[in-house]
């Protein structure tokens, strides 16, 4: 039997993280590729993001954040701070056709996972430290675990943006649907 | 330009709902099929559900809930209340191999969407009412919108269960990750 703790937390294992990272482009493709422009324009009001905005953010992360930061840790350790992450860069991609963005994300992710494998990271390397511009020392395994959790955070965001669109349409079922009631369960 | 309201709520359109419903099996397949048994055992503690528990719940809904309820509305209106939904039925499926469950969900969903098309639902039909055992009158469009939102709710749940597994592994990035901090953003 698994005890409770072992089911609520997993230790970082590189091969497992890579499996999860490889799943994200397919997941977003399945969620989004067939949607109409009206659905793709969905957001949560104000300055919140639409699904293509989220996808643009993920593409930007593949280009400038995760793998480049892993390389900095492997090559320079704490001697060279990471570049700050530009959390608004995706707006430059607004208006691009969604299928192109999905294809881009998939090919960038695949290339980054090949490049990650080429780094031949050992268990000892996972403890190497880099320097985050805001909060200082972080390990390579923390960076890679965050890559995974960040993907899942944005899968959640996209599913939430879509589900909330029917907040008025579900009628009395509203209170049973956490995506609409906003309750954590 | 789309105004803000039109981006935060979509009216119910049957063809759009069907598009979203068709995407869910592929989405869950992409998220889950390659995961190890350890990752599939992930839950949020106590009696919370693992990803296969959620999938079992969705399979049960395909078998007994959504399409059968749509048929009851079309055939009997409010004269016949729906069967209550058994929210624990999925535990009978515990131990089934995940690939079988994913295949089952995909084929049940595909069949249900074919059966839904065969009902030839008109815009007037969408206003027909049925009777929910707990909260009384509901329309066919509310039932079908709930089918969609319920899917997305459980996509969110699965992504959250997975992402939370790395709550300790992400180190100082914790506060930037809503899946781990628990903050809505």
Image: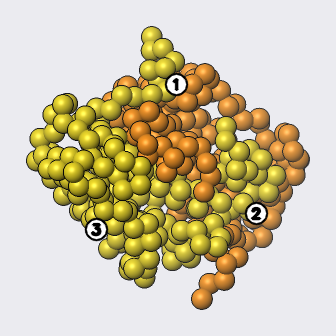
Chain colours: A yellow, B orange
Vertical placement of A79 versus A64: above or below?
A: above
Residue B21 placement, left or right of A63: right
Report which residue position mark 3 lands on. Answer: A104
Vertical placement of A41 versus B61: above or below?
A: below
Q: Are marks 1 and 2 in contact (CB under 8 Å)?
A: no
Quadrant placement of the C terminus of chain A: top right
Q: Based on the displayed image, in which of its 4 quarters is residue A90 positioned?
A: bottom left
Residue A162 placement, left or right of A146: right
Report the residue that reaches farthest toward the top. A1
Q: Chain for mark 2?
A: A
Q: Residues within 10 Å of mark 1 (few under 14, many from 20)?
A: some
Report which residue position mark 1 lands on. Answer: B93
Q: Residue at x 72, y 35 (%)?
A: B85
Vertical placement of B96 versus B21: above or below?
A: above
Residue A81, x across and y down, in percent: 28, 55
Q: Residue at x 44, y 20 (%)?
A: A6
Q: Nearer the viewer, mark 3 or mark 2?
A: 3
Q: Chain for mark 3?
A: A
Cα separation, mark 1 vs mark 2, equals 33 Å
Tag of residue A1: none
Q: Based on the displayed image, in which of its 4 quarters is residue A139 positioned?
A: top left
Q: Residues within 10 Å of mark 3 (few under 14, many from 20)?
A: some
Residue A5, x across and y down, in percent: 49, 20
Query: Which of these two is toward me, A25 or B135?
Result: A25
Q: Residue at x 59, y 43 (%)?
A: B182
Tag of residue A168: 2
Cα separation, mark 3 vs mark 2, equals 35 Å
Query: Which of these two is toward me, B155 or A43?
Result: A43
Query: Which of these two is toward me, A19 or A67?
Result: A67
């Amino acid at each position: 039997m698994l005890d409770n703790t072992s089911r609520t937390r997993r230790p970082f294992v590189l091969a497992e993280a890579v499996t999860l990272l490889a799943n994200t482009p397919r997941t977003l493709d399945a969620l989004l590729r067939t949607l109409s422009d009206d659905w793709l324009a969905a957001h949560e009001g104000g300055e919140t993001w639409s699904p293509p905005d989220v996808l643009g953010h993920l593409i930007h992360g593949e280009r400038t954040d995760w793998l480049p930061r892993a390389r900095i840790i492997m090559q320079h350790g704490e001697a060279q701070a990471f570049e700050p992450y530009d959390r608004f860069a995706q707006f430059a991609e607004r208006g691009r056709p969604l299928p192109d963005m999905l294809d881009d994300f998939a090919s960038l992710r695949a290339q980054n996972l090949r490049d990650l494998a080429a780094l031949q990271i050992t268990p000892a390397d996972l403890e190497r430290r880099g320097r985050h511009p805001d909060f200082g020392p972080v390990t390579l395994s923390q960076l890679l675990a965050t890559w995974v959790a960040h993907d899942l955070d944005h899968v959640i965001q996209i599913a939430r943006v879509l589900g909330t669109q029917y907040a008025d349409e579900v009628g009395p079922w509203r209170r049973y649907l956490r995506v609409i009631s906003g309750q954590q369960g």
